[in-house]
Image: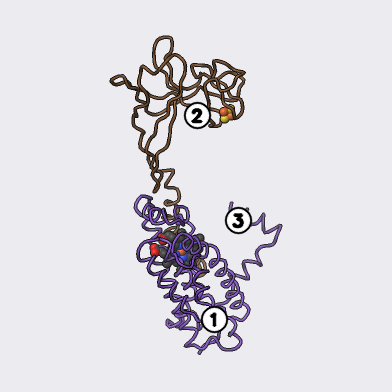
């Protein structure tokens, strides 16, 4: 049945070369942990991607219950965690995944750094990678405010003061982030929500796309 | 053991294992999220309780609208919402309390809501009409009679419970 549907589509639009190009290519011996166990360090990029997929999926599902409003944000998180079936698991995936994804990203970066895999011609992809790192940190930062509990509130207070410390543009940067020169409140929460759920994921997708296209174009770096 | 050995190539074996492990992981990841998402469909909802609505001596043979409030728990949001009923005494002196929710598409009906149709309930949305006993007037949009509230009388006070459909008229 599935084969038939596949053939029907393939006959019309010839999709085989498309996925072959993505999925079907040689894995060089030096990156295959079956040949050299130490090659497991090459897995961290893929693991980062895997955890990112978990973040995106669990985040999408959390948004079914979460409301970015100062009266209701905390209560909606409390409700989804205590009253909704598996709420604790889905929130837990997003909560712990946010830390795990940054650990994986860091390990991946260490591997690339110590193998010198960022050297010409891959400097551009190193820069894309660093951008992904910053986007990921920003996702963690903006997401942290969303439960609107005391920890979230004061962590954000601190973040905003740090932004304010930037010379010359600090005050403007702070107001831009918090939506108000004085108050950390309603507008801060809606802004952080929009940034967390729409702006940063969009940037993340674009950067990840570039990252993977570059890897396919340039291939994985050679053995040490 | 059978004579001809079922040969499984290394490639096939790896394909099956990877698909199996991958499928298992995807399922483990998605199952909690899907259950989380469909929770509203599976939650049981508490039945409404009886609420005091009117004094029995206020009730006449002419339908009158009575409003009362209930505490509504909408997930993390609690509020008071107003419910209404059209209440009257029929020829047998029985109290009838009709739900004002139109059985066409859910607008709100009023007793003699249109000057053109005296002695009927009228729904302004698509000119739905009901006789005094709540039965829908044939050839108007509603396809069923108005729901009837469960009621109870205690010490001269009318208490209403849930509105129940009456089945086909
Ligand atoms: C891929 C990177 C992402 C990271 C690193 C991340 C990080 C975080 C963090 C740290 C929190 C606070 C969690 C807590 O304190 O329990 C959070 C909350 C939240 N995130 Fe994300 N997030 C990501 C992607 C997304 C996406 C794509 C969406 C939606 C489309 C999303 C929606 C939410 C929502 C609704 C909350 C509030 C619920 C809660 O706090 O449990 N996230 N995120
Ligand atoms: S909703 Fe009442 S007539 Fe259509």
Any idea which chain is the brown one in this picture? B
Locate ligand 1 by image quadrant.
bottom left
Q: Residues within 10 Å of mark 2 (few under 14, many from 20)?
A: some
Q: What color was chain A assigned in the picture?
A: purple
Q: Residue furthest right?
A: A12
Q: Which residue is mark 3?
A: A3
Q: Earlier in the sequence, mark 3 or mark 1?
A: 3
**Dot 1: what SS?**
loop
User: In whole angstroms, how far apart are the C-alphas of marks 2 and 3?
Assistant: 51 Å
State whether residue B22 appears in this view: no
- Relative to the observer, which residue lies in front, A148 or B6? A148
**Dot 2: what SS?**
loop
The percent position of residue B121, horizontal first and vertical second, equals: 53, 21
Q: Which residue is mark 1?
A: A28
Mark nearer the viewer, 3 or 1: 1
The percent position of residue B100, horizontal first and vertical second, equals: 49, 27
Q: Are marks 2 and 1 in contact (CB under 8 Å)?
A: no
Question: Measuring 65% from the left and 64% from the top, which residue is drawn there?
Answer: A16
Looking at the image, residue B15 lies above or below residue A133? above
Question: Measuring 46% from the left and 54% from the top, which residue is drawn there?
Answer: A67
On residue A82, the disc is none
């Amino acid at each position: 049945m599935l084969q038939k549907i596949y053939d029907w589509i393939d006959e019309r639009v010839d999709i085989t070369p498309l996925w072959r190009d993505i999925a079907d290519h040689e894995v060089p011996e030096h990156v295959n942990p079956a040949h050299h166990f130490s090659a497991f360090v090459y897995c961290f990029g893929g693991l980062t991607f895997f955890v990112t997929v978990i973040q995106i999926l669990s985040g999408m599902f959390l948004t079914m219950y979460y409301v970015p409003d100062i009266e209701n944000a905390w209560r909606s998180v409390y409700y989804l965690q205590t009253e909704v079936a598996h709420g604790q698991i889905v929130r837990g995936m997003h909560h712990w995944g946010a830390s795990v994804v940054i650990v994986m990203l860091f390990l991946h970066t260490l591997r690339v750094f110590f193998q010198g895999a960022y050297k010409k011609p891959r400097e551009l992809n190193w820069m894309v990678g660093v951008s992904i790192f910053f986007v990921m940190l920003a996702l963690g930062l903006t997401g942290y405010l969303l439960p609107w509990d005391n920890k979230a509130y004061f962590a954000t207070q601190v973040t905003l003061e740090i932004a304010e410390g930037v010379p010359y543009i600090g005050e403007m940067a702070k107001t831009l982030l918090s939506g108000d020169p004085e108050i950390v409140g309603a507008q801060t929460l809606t802004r952080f929500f929009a940034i967390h759920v729409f702006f940063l994921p969009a940037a993340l997708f674009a950067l990840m796309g570039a990252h993977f296209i570059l890897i396919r174009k340039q291939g994985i770096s050679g053995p040490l | 053991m059978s004579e001809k050995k079922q040969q499984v190539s290394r490639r096939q074996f790896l394909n099956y294992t990877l698909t199996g492990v991958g499928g298992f992981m995807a399922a483990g990841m998605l199952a909690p999220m899907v259950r989380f998402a469909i929770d509203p469909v599976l939650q049981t909802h508490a039945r409404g309780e009886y609420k005091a609505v009117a004094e029995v001596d206020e009730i006449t043979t002419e339908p009158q609208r009575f409003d009362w409030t209930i505490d509504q728990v909408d997930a993390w949001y609690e509020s008071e919402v107003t419910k209404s009923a059209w209440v009257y005494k029929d020829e047998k002196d029985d109290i009838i309390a009709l739900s004002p929710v139109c059985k066409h598409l859910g607008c709100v009906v009023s007793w003699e809501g249109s000057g053109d149709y005296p002695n009927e309930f009228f729904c302004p949305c698509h000119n739905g009409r009901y006789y005094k006993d709540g039965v829908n007037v044939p050839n108007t949009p509603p396809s069923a009679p108005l729901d009837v509230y469960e009621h109870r009388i205690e010490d001269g006070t009318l208490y209403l419970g849930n509105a129940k459909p009456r089945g086909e008229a």
